[in-house]
Image (cartoon, rainbow, N blue to C red):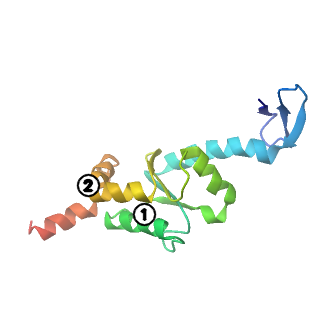
Amino acid sequence: MAAARCMRSGAAACLLRPADGLVRAASARFLCAAADLQKDLGEMVKKDKVVVFMKGTPAQPMCGFSNAVVQILRMHGVDQYASYNVLEDQELREGVKVFSNWPTIPQVYFNGEFVGGCDILLQMHQNGDLVDELKKLGIRSALLDRKNQDSGN
């Protein structure tokens, strides 16, 4: 088992001490950046009520699953959310998968908590749970207003 230790923030190298006891240098960017990225991801998902890691942007999704998440949020009137395009940063793309322990993109977070991917959000939309979860965030689903309009209220 190897132990890695960052010498200091911005260090040029990290020290590895594998089971054989020999100290080896490794790229600080590789080892230290991974720990920093996980910390940064923890801060990113807490910064906004709704956070989406996706392929593309809400204005131009680059895959069907990311587009579906954008459309579901749009149907509920959720237009204000943080989105991160994982296609622009391979480290972010892989790092968020490690962070959530979820292998696919897109990934949706509410108040810093991992919700799931497209399939989970779609299921929540279909069974009505998404309306309740948005309410917990202080967001009134636009579908409630449409439902009232349809029933003549």
Measure how far apart labels 2 and 1 are at the Cα level: 15 Å
Q: Is residue 34 above or below residue 22?
A: below
Q: Is residue 39 above or below residue 70?
A: above
**Residue shown at the point (86%, 42%) measured from the top left:** 26
| Kind of residue sitting beneath label 1 | Val
State the residue position of label 2: 128
- The quarter of the image holding the N terminus is top right
Residue 94 in percent (x, y) is at: 64, 53
**Residue shown at the point (8%, 69%) measured from the top left:** 152
Residue 107 in percent (x, y) is at: 50, 55
Q: Is residue 52 left or right of residue 98?
A: left
| Kind of residue sitting beneath label 2 | Gly
Q: Is residue 139 left or right of residue 80?
A: left
Near mark 1 (Cα within 10 A), the count class, few <14, some 14-19 or many ≥20, is many
- Precedes in sequence: disc 2 or disc 1: 1
**Residue shown at the point (48%, 66%) measured from the top left:** 66
Q: On the image, which quarter does residue 78 sit in?
A: bottom left
Q: Report helix, strand or loop for mark 2.
A: loop
Residue 144 in percent (x, y) is at: 21, 61
State the residue position of label 1: 69
User: Which mark is on residue 13?
Assistant: none
Q: Is residue 127 left or right of residue 59?
A: left
Near mark 2 (Cα within 10 A), the count class, few <14, some 14-19 or many ≥20, is few
